[in-house]
C-alpha cells in the first residue's frame, strides 16, 4: 500500500476531508431532505463498524485529516460510540479532527461519549426555533428534545454549530432571531441553500432562497465582517460583532464553491462519491472485505481521476440533480 501518497484529483485539489456515512436511516423526515415514506437499506448491506474504522484508517494513511460522521442520522446507528472511540484513536496517526452532523435528537444519550472519544465540535441541524414549524418541517420532530440535546452537548464540552437550511416562505423571517439565539448560546450558525437531491414532495424551486438575500436581512440588525476562519467545509464565514460568534454561508447554487472542494463522501454501504451532485463513484465494500490494500488504493485513485470539476445544480429542472437523497450520500 502506498500509504504516503496523498489523495489528489485531476483538477489539482487535495482531498483531506471525508464525510463518512454510518447509516441512511433517520428519526426525522425533513421535507427538503427526503420523501415522507422512505425505503431504507437492509442493515445487512451496511459496512460493519469494524469495516468503517478500517476504511477510516486507510483514508488517514492517504493523508485525510478530517472525518465527519454523517447519515441519515448517525446517532441512530447501534454502536456509534464504539466507532467514535476507534476513529478518535486515529489522532495518533494524523487525524486532526473528528466531527459529526446530527439532528440532535439523540444527543442527550451520546454527547458525553462523543466528547470522551475525542470529538471537540459537532454540527446540529436546526431550521427553526418555533416548535410547530419544527414539527412541520421535520414531519413530527420534537424541538424540546433537540434543545435538550444541545444542552447535553454543551455540558460535555462540545462546541456547536447550528446548520439552518434557508427556506423561502418557511423560515426566512427567522434568520436574525436564530443568529441572536445562537450568539446567546455561544453557537456559530451556518445558513445553507436547499439542493436538488432526490425526490421530495413539493417543488424545491418554490422554497429556494439565495443566501445573498439572507445576508442582507441579517445586516439590517448585525455587523458582519468577513472572516478568515475555515473549518475544512464549504461554509464561508463572517464574524458577528454584536455576538462574538460567526455566521457562515453555504451557497451551492448562488455562489459555487467547487474550485476549493477537498471532500469525498462515503455511503454506509461503502460506495464513495467524488461529488454530491454527480453519480460518479467507486464501490469499496467488496475490496475492503478482500483485505487488498493496493486494490483499495487503485479504486480511490480511479475515483479521484474522474472527480468532477463542479456540480451542476439547476432548480429550474423538474428532475433532481441525482436520484439519491442526501441521507443516502451522507450530509
Image (cartoon, rainbow, N blue to C red):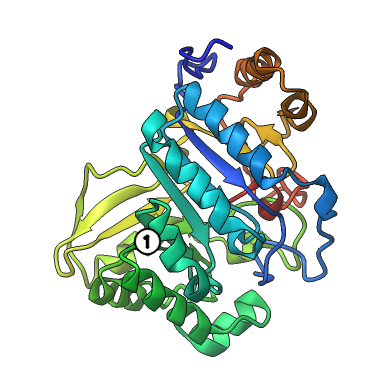
The residue positioned 44% from the left and 45% from the top of the image is 88
Percent position of residue 20, x then y? 58, 43
Secondary structure state at the residue bearing disc 1: strand
The residue positioned 61% from the left and 25% from the top of the image is 308
Q: Which residue is mark 1?
A: 161
Percent position of residue 264, x then y? 57, 33
- Pointer 1: residues within 10 angstroms few (<14), some, or many (20+)? many
Q: Is residue 267 visible?
A: yes
Q: Is residue 255 visible?
A: no
Residue 156: name its quadrant.
bottom left
Indicate whether 252 appears above or below 271.
below
Percent position of residue 117, x then y? 43, 53
Q: How many marks?
A: 1
The residue nearer to you, when weighing 182 against 147, is 147
The residue nearer to you, when weighing 92 against 205, is 92
Indicate whether 128 appears above or below 158.
below
The residue nearer to you, when weighing 234 against 285, is 285
Indicate whether 206 appears above or below 270.
below
Relative horizontal placement of residue 263, taking residue 188 as reference (left or right): right
The N terminus, quarter of image = top right
Q: Which residue of the protein is positioned furthest toward the bottom in this rendering? A: 132
The residue positioned 52% from the left and 88% from the top of the image is 131
The residue positioned 20% from the left and 56% from the top of the image is 239
Residue 57: name its quadrant.
top right
Percent position of residue 134, x then y? 55, 81
Amino acid at each position: 500500500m502506498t500509504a504516503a501518497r496523498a489523495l489528489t484529483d485531476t483538477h489539482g485539489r487535495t482531498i483531506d476531508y471525508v464525510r463518512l456515512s454510518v447509516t441512511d436511516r433517520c428519526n426525522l423526515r425533513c421535507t427538503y431532505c427526503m420523501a415522507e415514506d422512505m425505503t431504507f437499506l437492509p442493515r445487512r448491506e451496511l459496512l460493519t463498524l469494524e469495516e468503517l474504522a478500517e476504511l477510516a484508517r486507510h483514508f488517514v494513511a492517504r493523508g485525510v485529516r478530517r472525518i465527519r460522521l454523517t447519515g441519515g442520522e448517525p446517532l441512530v446507528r447501534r454502536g456509534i460510540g464504539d466507532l467514535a472511540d476507534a476513529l478518535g484513536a486515529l489522532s495518533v496517526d494524523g487525524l486532526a479532527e473528528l466531527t459529526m452532523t446530527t439532528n440532535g435528537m439523540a444527543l442527550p444519550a451520546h454527547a458525553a461519549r462523543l466528547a470522551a472519544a475525542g470529538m471537540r465540535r459537532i454540527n446540529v441541524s436546526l431550521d427553526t426555533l418555533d416548535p410547530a414549524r419544527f414539527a412541520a418541517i421535520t414531519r413530527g420532530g420534537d424541538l424540546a428534545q433537540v434543545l435538550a440535546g444541545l444542552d447535553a452537548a454543551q455540558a460535555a464540552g462540545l462546541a456547536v454549530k447550528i446548520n439552518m437550511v434557508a427556506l423561502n416562505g418557511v423560515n426566512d423571517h427567522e434568520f436574525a432571531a436564530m443568529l441572536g439565539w445562537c450568539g446567546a448560546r455561544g453557537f456559530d450558525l451556518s445558513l445553507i441553500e436547499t439542493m436538488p437531491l432526490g425526490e421530495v414532495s413539493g417543488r424545491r424551486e418554490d422554497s429556494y432562497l439565495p443566501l445573498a438575500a439572507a445576508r442582507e436581512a441579517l445586516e439590517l440588525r448585525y455587523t458582519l465582517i468577513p472572516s478568515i476562519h475555515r473549518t475544512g467545509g464549504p461554509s464561508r464565514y463572517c464574524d458577528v460583532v454584536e455576538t462574538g460568534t460567526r455566521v457562515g454561508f453555504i451557497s451551492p447554487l448562488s455562489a459555487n464553491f467547487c474550485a476549493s472542494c477537498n471532500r469525498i463522501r462515503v455511503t454506509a454501504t461503502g460506495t464513495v462519491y467524488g461529488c454530491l451532485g454527480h453519480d460518479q463513484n467507486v464501490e469499496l465494500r467488496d475490496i475492503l472485505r478482500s483485505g487488498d490494500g493496493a486494490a483499495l488504493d487503485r479504486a480511490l485513485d480511479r475515483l479521484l481521476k474522474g472527480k468532477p470539476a463542479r456540480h451542476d445544480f439547476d432548480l429550474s429542472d423538474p428532475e433532481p440533480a441525482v436520484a439519491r437523497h442526501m441521507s443516502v450520500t451522507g450530509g
